[in-house]
């Protein structure tokens, strides 16, 4: 069985802070990590490999530096790593990103595709389902349990108010959430060998795509502007009889649509 | 033909999800700016009784797809149904609630319609001149906001975070059209088979994921006092947390502690009751979006970080507050 795992290298947004004076994003010194949900995706692929045997390939689209994330995945025990990199890919929205990833999947071949549900930087959770649509594959998102059966998988899919058990034939695409498993650490042996392994690099022409289809040009959505919430306004203080105080709180909460 | 602002009316087991009504309110505003119409797209099985509610909350027209294969949500059947409607009616805009269903469905539909999708929006408006939809959303874990457009593709699509917009008051005099739309779905179109559906109101106890937190400190004075805070939290749809003093006193569990040796929270609303605001406590909550502090001591440090500082006895203010919120909720019957 061939398993493709899509992983994205992301800045550790837990470490990102806003400068309270200027209201801008402080990105210096923020480490790059494998997106947390993708760690669960890698772990699940490795678990399946151990259980039923499989070849696990991690694939990422990103700048050349994203190689670091691939080496990290190799050190966890994945078999192969593919870096999709091309200047034409820059500035892609989820449509254009998923198109590149889907084309790569077609070239590489697969029985099962696993991805993270959501990347902590872009935060859209759209790439997984969009890849599935490009490939005309069934999808299950919010996966918290996977069981491999004969030619199909049984998965548990989380909802706000419960879960569903679903059965789907291979090939299919699953997006993983943190409840799925506990990702392993790097393996000492693999840490040494991960640098000797080759990383396959593919660009626009290797995927048979045109410039107009990818990157910023190929993206239907455009970021018109981005901003931080800016420095916080000065608070207000009231010393009033209880019912008046309660009224002030209620009015504020109403204005902010909190009630 | 009028420009259609479509809202996917999400129902589960025949119950409309609140976010769908919130979206109708917003869609009404946007449609009025575009001189367009609000169309609710309702999918399900034997759900015709819901059409009135959609009209009362702002829909001009309801497109009803009532089909046995739509009884439970499946990506395949719902995507197929929505795309068939969209291809026939060419909506200008489609709004979908950013629920666990909407965030599965939205990208699948957008990719099939070859258009853009903006995720989990918290702000929606229309450009004054070119009339494009302006979709604002948080990214980078809420650290930045981005305003996104979809200039050259239609429909313009967004998923919208629940609880951001208010449910409009129902107008029982409003009239609208209900149009049935037939689609051809076969069992075979649904590739993912449902084996079991389990409902469990798993109580959200991860305080780092809560949008609204009512937090109590030593000033609450007793375990019973926390029942009052729980009542406020329930009224607001939030959860209860506490300072270390409250945890050490055994009034609340350790996994609800906010602060340096507890958890760091960033809810939309943090209400601190009887908490002084020691530096170790502030470290865990000062990035909350909106902070209300209720404290007897006007000079307590928490009052300086609060957006709204109320000087007073929590045992007098909180019961009044619960009463006010309940009264407000009743004044506008939402469902
Ligand atoms: C501020 C801001 C807001 C944005 N808003 C939108 C928006 O609303 N709509 C939109 O279409 N685009 C948006 N984008 C662009 C979007 O962030 C990029 O397209 C990004 O490459 C993918 O989206 P994501 O990070 O949200 O991934 P998600 O869809 O959240 O990622 C889900 C999973 O897909 C896989 N995956 C995602 N990216 C890659 C990759 N490069 N390589 C390998 N696997 C990957 C991973 O398994 C990941 O866990 C925005 C960008 C910015 C900077
Ligand atoms: C290493 C270290 C780590 C720590 N980690 C944490 C941590 O993670 N989280 C944490 O919270 N603390 C932590 N602390 C403890 C912290 O220093 C404070 O002692 C603690 O936060 C105080 O809790 P409090 O505000 O509830 O109590 P107090 O400081 O005693 O404040 C009680 C407040 O209630 C008010 N009050 C009393 N009665 C009423 C009433 N009826 N109505 C309204 N207001 C009333 C008073 O005016 C007062 O301001 C830590 C301390 C150390 C040294």
Image (cartoon, coloured by chain):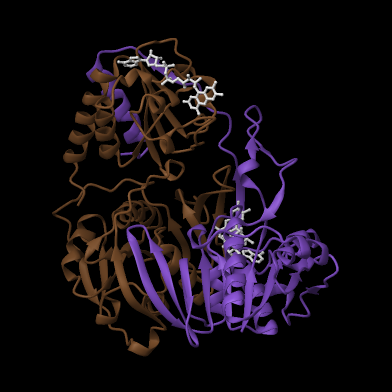
Chain colours: A purple, B brown
Closer-to-camera residue (A67/B330): A67
The image position of residue B127, as x and y in percent, is: 50, 51
The answer to which image quadrant residue B44 occupies is: bottom left
The answer to whether residue A234 is seen in the rendering is yes
Residue positioned 71% across, 59% down in the render: A186
Q: In what quadrant does ligand 2 lie?
A: top left
The image position of residue B14, as x and y in percent, is: 21, 66
Residue positioned 57% across, 72% down in the render: A114
Closer-to-camera residue (A196/B135): A196
Q: Where B111 falls versus B98 (above or below)?
A: below
Q: Is residue B116 left or right of residue B239?
A: right
The answer to whether residue B307 is seen in the rendering is no
The image position of residue A233, as x and y in percent, is: 51, 25
Q: Where B242 falls versus B183 (above or below)?
A: above
The answer to which image quadrant residue B91 occupies is: bottom left
Q: Where A99 falls versus B259 (above or below)?
A: below
Q: How many marks are shown on the rendered structure?
A: 0
Residue positioned 29% across, 81% down in the render: B69
Given the current orientation, which residue lies at the most extreme right position?
A196
Q: Is residue A169 left or right of residue A238?
A: right
The answer to which image quadrant residue A106 occupies is: bottom right
Q: Where B35 falls versus B326 (above or below)?
A: below
Q: Is residue A72 left or right of residue B334?
A: right
Q: Quadrant of the N terminus of chain A?
A: bottom right
């Amino acid at each position: 069985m061939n398993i493709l795992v899509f992983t994205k290298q992301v800045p550790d947004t837990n470490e990102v802070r806003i400068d309270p004076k200027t209201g801008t994003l402080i990105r210096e010194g923020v480490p790059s990590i494998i997106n947390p949900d993708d760690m669960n995706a890698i772990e699940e692929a490795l678990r399946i490999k151990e259980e039923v045997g499989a070849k696990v390939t991690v694939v990422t689209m990103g700048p050349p530096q994203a190689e670091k994330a691939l080496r990290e995945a190799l050190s966890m025990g994945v078999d192969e790593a593919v870096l999709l990199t091309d200047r034409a890919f820059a500035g892609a929205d989820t449509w254009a990103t998923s198109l590149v990833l889907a084309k790569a999947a077609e070239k590489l071949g697969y029985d099962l595709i696993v991805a993270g549900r959501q990347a902590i930087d872009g935060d859209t959770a759209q790439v997984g389902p969009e890849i599935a649509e490009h490939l005309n594959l069934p999808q299950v998102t919010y996966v918290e349990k996977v069981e491999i059966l004969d030619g199909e998988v049984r998965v548990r899919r989380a909802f706000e108010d419960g879960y569903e058990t679903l059965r789907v034939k291979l090939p299919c695409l699953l997006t993983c959430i943190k409840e799925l498993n506990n990702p392993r650490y790097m393996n000492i042996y693999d840490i040494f060998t991960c640098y000797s392994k080759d990383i396959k690099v593919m660009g626009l022409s290797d995927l048979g795509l045109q410039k107009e289809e990818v990157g910023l040009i190929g993206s239907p959505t455009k970021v018109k502007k981005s901003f931080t919430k800016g420095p916080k306004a000065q608070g207000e203080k009231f010393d009033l009889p209880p019912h008046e105080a309660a009224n002030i709180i209620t009015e504020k909460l109403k204005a902010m649509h909190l009630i | 033909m009028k420009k259609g602002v479509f809202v996917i009316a999400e129902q589960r087991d025949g119950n409309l999800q609140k976010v769908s009504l919130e979206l109708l309110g917003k869609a009404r505003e946007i449609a009025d700016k575009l001189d367009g119409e609000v169309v609710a797209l309702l999918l399900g099985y034997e759900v015709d009784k819901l059409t009135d509610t959609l009209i009362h909350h702002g829909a001009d027209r309801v497109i009803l797809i009532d089909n046995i294969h739509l009884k439970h949500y499946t990506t395949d059947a719902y995507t197929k149904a929505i795309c068939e409607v969209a291809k026939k009616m060419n909506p200008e805009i489609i709004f979908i609630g950013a629920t666990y269903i909407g965030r599965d469905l939205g990208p699948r539909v957008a990719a099939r319609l070859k258009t853009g999708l903006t995720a989990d929006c918290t702000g929606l408006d229309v450009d004054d001149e070119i009339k494009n939809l302006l979709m604002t959303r948080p990214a980078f874990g809420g650290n930045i906001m981005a305003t996104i457009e979809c200039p050259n593709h239609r429909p313009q699509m967004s998923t919208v975070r629940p609880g951001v917009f208010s449910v409009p008051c129902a107008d029982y005099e409003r009239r609208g059209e209900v149009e049935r739309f037939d689609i051809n779905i076969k069992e075979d179109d649904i590739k993912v088979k449902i084996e079991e559906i389990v409902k469990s109101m798993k109580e959200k106890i991860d305080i780092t994921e809560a949008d609204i937190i009512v937090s109590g400190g030593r000033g609450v004075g007793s375990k019973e006092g926390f029942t009052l805070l729980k009542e406020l939290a329930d009224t607001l749809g939030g959860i209860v947390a506490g300072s270390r003093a409250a945890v050490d006193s055994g009034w609340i569990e350790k996994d609800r502690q906010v602060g340096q040796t507890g958890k760091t929270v960033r809810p939309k609303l943090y209400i601190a009751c009887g908490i002084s605001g020691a530096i170790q406590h502030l470290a865990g909550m000062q990035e909350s979006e909106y902070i209300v502090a209720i404290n007897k001591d006007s000079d307590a440090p928490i009052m300086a970080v609060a957006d709204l500082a109320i000087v007073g006895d929590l045992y007098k203010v909180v019961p009044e507050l619960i009463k006010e919120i309940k009264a407000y909720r009743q004044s506008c019957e939402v469902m």
